[in-house]
Structure formats: structure tokens, C-alpha cells
Amino acid sequence: MPQPEFLPIQWKSTYLSLLDQRALPGKKEFLEIKSVEETIIAIRDMAVRGAPAIAITGIFGLTLGAKKKSGKVNSQEIESLIKQVFESRPTAVNLSFALQEAKKRVEGETLWESVQTVWESFALEMMVDDLNANQTLGKNGANLFPKNQEEFHIITHCNTGALATAGHGTALGVIRSLRDMGKKVVVYADETRPFLQGSRLTAFEMMEEGIECYIITDGMSGWLMNHRKIDAVLVGCDRVAANGDTANKIGTYNLAIVAHEHNVPFYVCATKDSFDLNLKTGEEIPIEMRKESEVTQFDFLKTHDGKYLFPEGKTSPVGARALNPSFDITKAKFIKNFITELGCFVPGEIPIRLKNV
């Protein structure tokens, strides 16, 4: 199996080593996570982000929580650990599904030492499965593009690469697969306000691999589609309802509408664990509201001597209020295809494709 381009999640048997994505692109800094509490903070504060990466990290967090315990298992403590991790970021269904599976796998276990072993094995298994799924997804997606065309111009939103997964990535995985087929790919990365995952992380990954990439602000996609030939929009997702409505990073819905208006194919890239057939429509998907300060100030905008470029990092008037929903819902009607490790299909085929998986 090919090795992933980045190893943002590394298990060291006694602790979890996480690439702190808040520090990128300035420096590659790893956090030593030694408890479930530290795991929750890392997820909540976005040191690790991306639905698959959050799920894997969450199960390693359970493992660390079990390591702190000994003796006989208390079912209430199991429930408490799982609830704590779930509440760290509730929108991404990958985490919820992983925690449900983690609970099933320790049913009947009587000692914490055994629980720890089961959860550790499960987390490591998840890493391998996610990498394999991403590589298959990437190839499936690349096959949607014309074989006789040598150059593709693609818009992305947020970060959907190796940093958000166990390796290769979902939407960026398709781009990597096109590159591996010998195609030239030009990427236009939405900056993705307010946390700038596109400009900080997607551009970082593309530069690391020598793939041509231009950062655009979230409001530039309409101009781009008017003035340059765009072959597709590729995005990831955090949860998909049974009808195809999709939750993804805030700004995705806007991009889908603009793509629809310009007849640009809009593709959602997702592994099977992002589909939630228990939800009929996107209206049932919970939307996480984050801190107002992420919108009103740039804590990371400092000069070389550590001074803020704006007073106290603020980019808005003191006392100004902000709304900060972390996700929005893209209606199924705007999505041309879902690209998955199970193949590519239209929203209406979701129940059939996912029913027995």
C-alpha cells in the first residue's frame, strides 16, 4: 500500500502525535496528546480537522481514556467517555459512526485493559481503511474526467486532502489521482473563511506536491467561472442525508449555486462513512456554531516581532457581533455526482448504493 503524503496522525503506543494544523503553513509542529481531555481540546480547537481525521483521532482519544483506567469495566464510564468525545464536534457523522462502532466492539469486555486493546486496534484499522478508501475514491473520481483532455481547472473549498484524512484525501485525492495519471491540474482554492483552511492548508498541500494552485477569496468563484474555463468543482463533506442534501464547510452552498448557474459540474467527494441514511433531508443535520472571535479577529496575523497587524488582532470594530456557523447545507439538486470508494452516483441512488454497506 502506498504511504500517505503526510502523516498528520501518528500513534506512538503511549500517546497520540497530532500535526497541529493551526500552525500551518508557518511550521510543522506536533502535539503530544496523552489523555481523552487533550484529545477533545485538539478536536474542538481544530488542531485536527476533517471528518475522517476527527473520527480516527476520536477513537485514539477513547484509547487514551481507557489507558487511564484499570480493573473492571463500568458501563457508565464507557458511555461517559463516548459522550465527551462525541460532543467535541457533532456535525461530522464519521465521528458518530466510529463511536457507535467502538461501543459495540467492547460489549462483553470486563476489564479496562481489554477495552484499551480493542479500541487501539480499531483506531489503527480505521487509519488503514480510510487510506485505502481515499485512494480508491480518487481513482473513481479521476475516471469521470475526459480521457482525451490533458489539462483540468478545478475549484475546491476548505481542505479535503491528506491533512483531513489518513492520507491522499477525498476531493484533493481526486486531484492527486488525476496528476498521477499524467494530467496537468490547476487548482483554485477558496480561502475558506473564517479559519482559512483553503489558503493555509490546501495551498500548502498543493505546493508540497508541485501542483499548480491559486488561492481565491470565497467570493471570487463567480468571476473565475466567467473569465476562465472551469472543468469542475470538487468538495468534501461532513454528512450526507438520505436524499443527497450535504453538509460541508460554510460557503459550499454559495459555491454550488454559482457552479449551477455556470453549468460547471459540482462533485461531492465522500467515503461511505459520511452518509447518514437515518436523516431524510439536510434540515435534520445539526450545524455547529463556533466562536464569534473567529470572524471578528485574526489571532494568527502578526508581524515578525510578534505584534498584531491589527489592534489585538481585531479586524472589526470593538463590540461588533458576528455569526459563525461552521457548516451549511447544499441541496441535492445542485450536486451532479457523489464520488466515493463504492463508485460514482447521483443523489437519488444513495439509498440503493448505501443500503447494505
Image (cartoon, rainbow, N blue to C red):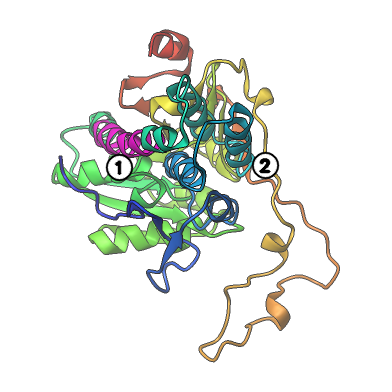
* Nearest the eye: 194 or 357: 357
Q: Which numbered dot is residue 337?
A: none
Amino acid tagged 1: Gly
Q: Quadrant of the N terminus?
A: top left
Q: Is residue 323 left or right of residue 302?
A: right
SS label for mark 2: loop
Instruction: Inspect the magenta stretch and tell me whether residue 125 lies in it.
Output: yes
Pointer 1 residue:
173
Q: Which residues are magenta?
A: 119-136
Q: Is residue 165 left or right of residue 34?
A: left
Residue 53 visible? The answer is yes
Measuring 37% from the left and 44% from the top, which residue is drawn there? 165
Instruction: Inspect the magenta stretch and tell me whether residue 17 lies in it.
Output: no
Instruction: Compare marks 2 and 1 and give the one earlier in the sequence.
Output: 1
**Which is closer to the viewer, label 2 or label 1?**
2
Residue 183 visible? The answer is no
Q: Which quadrant would residue 127 be assigned to in this image?
A: top left
How many numbered marks, from 0 up?
Answer: 2
Measuring 60% from the left and 36% from the top, which residue is drawn there? 91
Q: Which residue in the rendered view is the most extreme toward the bottom? A: 305
Amino acid tagged 2: Glu
The alpha-carbon separation of the residues under discs 2 and 1 comes to: 26 Å
Measuring 62% from the left and 19% from the top, which residue is drawn there? 281
Marks 2 & 1, CB-CB < 8 Å contact: no
Q: Which quadrant would residue 210 be assigned to in this image?
A: bottom left
Q: Residues within 10 Å of mark 2 (few under 14, many from 20)?
A: some
Q: Quadrant of the C terminus?
A: top left
SS label for mark 1: helix
Q: Is residue 4 above or below residue 341?
A: below
Instruction: Give x and y (percent) for residue 72.
Output: 52, 32
Pointer 2 residue:
288
Q: Main secondary structure of the magenta part?
A: helix
